[in-house]
Each structure stands twice: as structure tokens, then as C-alpha cells.
Image: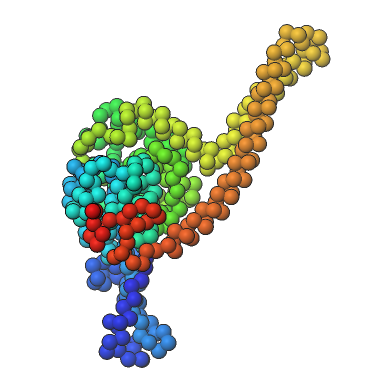
Amino acid sequence: MRYRDLRPQAEEGLTDGCAVGFNYGTPATGLARTERSVPVPYIKLFFLEKKFIVQLLIMKLAIQIPAYNEAEHLPAVMAELPRLLPGVDEIVVVVVDDGSTDDTARVALEHGADFVLQHRRNRGLSKAFIDGIQFCLALGADIIVNTDADNQYPGSEIIKLIEPLLQGRADLVIGDRQTLENKHFSPFKRMMEHLGSRVIRRVSNTNVPDTVSGFRAFSRYAALRMQVYNPYSYTLETLIQAGKGQMKIESVLIETNAATRASRLHKGMFNFIWRQGGAIIRSYVLYQPLRTFLSIGAVLFLIGAVLLGRFLVYYLLFNGSSRFIQSVSIGGTFLVAGITLIMFGFLGDAMRANRQISEESMIHQRDTAIISNLENLSEFRGHPVFSKQNPVS
């Protein structure tokens, strides 16, 4: 949360000697309220150098929508997005245009988007997602909701998604599409989504029922720590990062709209399984290199040791080693491969430690890089930014 300085309004008509106090309530719509379960200082009054200071606690929600050629569906998506929510003072809508060739950016602004962050060419869903997260952080967002541009997720469900974050119960909240009962899914998709989620829950060490749902809400703490390396999809990797980072994760049941088009990301269920399988293997290598390479290397080393041992036993005891001469070459190969993989494991673990140090620096940089002049904002890290003040030409 961030504070808005109300010093100019407060100093008018006030003199030294005023009482110092706190008004606890919900930061919403500019009025103090008391129904919030976890009270926070809404209006803070104090003296500083004999001056009366008033600060107002601001809760800012950013709703980001990665989009690629979604000019047809964005109006329906934008129409459902809330503009006032209990517990939230300011809502900003950000559309990440991933190099669309239609009028996605123009349509987004015409239907209520506050900002459009545009990629000059199509860079994929993962890149659009993480660039949107970084842009929302730079806008000063305390909560970031990610939703789809194809209107799969109703905007009315956002209030349910952010409630655990407002109450301080979670760092990441994922909308559960109830895949086994979802009437908009085919029976085969229901089964595969359910089985896939079971595997990913085991990998990520979480209890999330719907692990590939893109309808998610991140606290600022969680968003600062998100970094996606998988070019295919962000859902698995961000969940693994949250699980390995010991973040508090919750799920909420949501309804979904009927599909408006075939998925561009999943070109058939088997293609989806193939890509997600690769993402799982990559995640093991990236986040658990020592355990992964040590386990595989130990198996290969053991096989090689057994084959070489068989040759040595017959060579030393039975003088019949000529029949097992191939065991030397095969066993030696397994032995060398096992030792090599074990060394890779220790090397990867050292690199992981260095990456963690770099990530701490990245977190600090993201947290402090707040955009101050939004009216003249036209570019963010090399990407064009459009708004009402800077419309699409």
C-alpha cells in the first residue's frame, strides 16, 4: 500500500496542538469504513516539525489483460471489469498488446483501458504476462489481477479473487474453474486438466486444484518475485516459484464463460501435454538442479558400477571375462555419464545460488522503479505505451 499526502488540505485551518489519532477502516472510495476484517490505518494523523500531517492509505488494484488480435472480444471483456470494489481505492486496467495486427490497442482504449503496453512484434504469452506484471508494479499496484482477453473469466469474479489478498491470507490466489464439473469443457479436456493438475501439484508442492488457470491475483510481494523463463506459458512456472518460495497460496471457486474461439496456445491436448511436460522438466532443472542431476547421475553411476563389477568378478575369479568384455565399454560409459551429471548438479546448484542473489537485486529494483509522471508516459522499457493522453496514432 502507498500513502497519499493530504498535507495541503489538512494544514488549512489547523494549528499546532491538534490531537494525534488513527482512524481505522477500509481504504475504499475515499470514505473510512469499519467492516474490514483486518483493520489497517486508513487516515494517519501525526505531527512532523510542528506541522500537522494527514496521510491517506491507498490500495491500488491493477487488472492486466495479455491480448493478441483480440479486437473482437475485448469490448465484452472490458464491459465486465469492475471500476469500484470494496477495499480498493483505485483500479487501473492495463492491456498488453502482444504485437497484434488488428486494432486491439485502439479498441482497448476506446472501451476503457487506462494503458496499453504494446510489443512491436508477437513475443508470446509468457513475455506479455511478465512485461504486464512489471508495468503494473511500476504503476504502484498493490494487487495485480491477470485475466484473459477471450472473455473466459467473468469480470464479476474479481472480487472473489482479491478477497484473500485484502484480508492478508494469501500472496497468490488462483481461480478454480472446477474442471471436473465445468459444462464448457469436453469430457476429454476435463479428464486431462484434472490429471495434469495432479502432476503439477506434486511438482510445485502446492494444493491448488486448477493449476493451469490463468485467472490469478498476485500481491505486490508475490508479483515482485515472479520471473518467467518458459516461453510457452507462465501458469506452471509462476506456481512453482510461489510454491518453492513458501508463499501463501489459495484457490477460490469461479464460474467461466463459454469459449468464444479455439485456444491459440493449446494446439490439441497432446501438444499441450508435450509442452507442459517440457516445462516440468525445465522447472526441475532450474529450481532443483542438485536433486535432479544427483538422482539421475546416481542411477547411471550404479548401473555402470554393476556392469564393471560383473566383468571384474569373472576376470578375477573365473577367468572367463572375455564373454563380458562389452560390459567394460557399456559400464564405463554409464559410469562417466553418471559422474558428469552429478558434477552438473553441483554446478547447477552453485548457479542457482547466484541467481537467487541476482533476483534479490531485481526485486529491489522493481519495487523502487515507480513511474511518477503518468500523464506524459509514452514508453516503458522500450515498449510503446498508449493512454487517453497518448492515444494510438
User: In screen coordinates, is 178 left or right of 315?
Assistant: left
Q: Is residue 189 left or right of residue 226?
A: left
Whether residue 385 is situated above or below residue 243 in the rendered picture: below
**Looking at the image, which residue is at 59% across and 35% down?**
293
Q: Residue furthest front?
A: 393
The residue depicted at 77 percent of the width and 10 percent of the height is 321
Name which quarter of the figure residue 179 lies in.
top left
How many badges with numbers are in the image? Answer: 0
Q: Is residue 21 visible?
A: no
Image x and y of residue 157, in percent: 24, 50
The quarter of the displayed image where residue 139 is located? bottom left
Image quadrant holding the N terminus, namely bottom left
Q: What residue sits 52% from the left and 56% below the top?
A: 360
Residue that appears at 39% across and 45% down = 127
Q: Position of residue 203 (x, y in %)?
A: 47, 38
Which residue is nearer to you in this view: 87 or 290?
290
Q: Is residue 238 visible?
A: yes
The figure's colour scheme reads rainbow
Left or right: 72 as drawn, with respect to 276: left
Height in image: 349 above or below 30? above
Depth check, front residue: 164 or 332: 332
- In the displayed structure, 70 sits above or below 48; it is above
- Above or below, 132 against 306 in this view is below
Residue 29, x across and y down, in percent:
23, 67
Q: Position of residue 62 (x, y in %)?
A: 31, 57
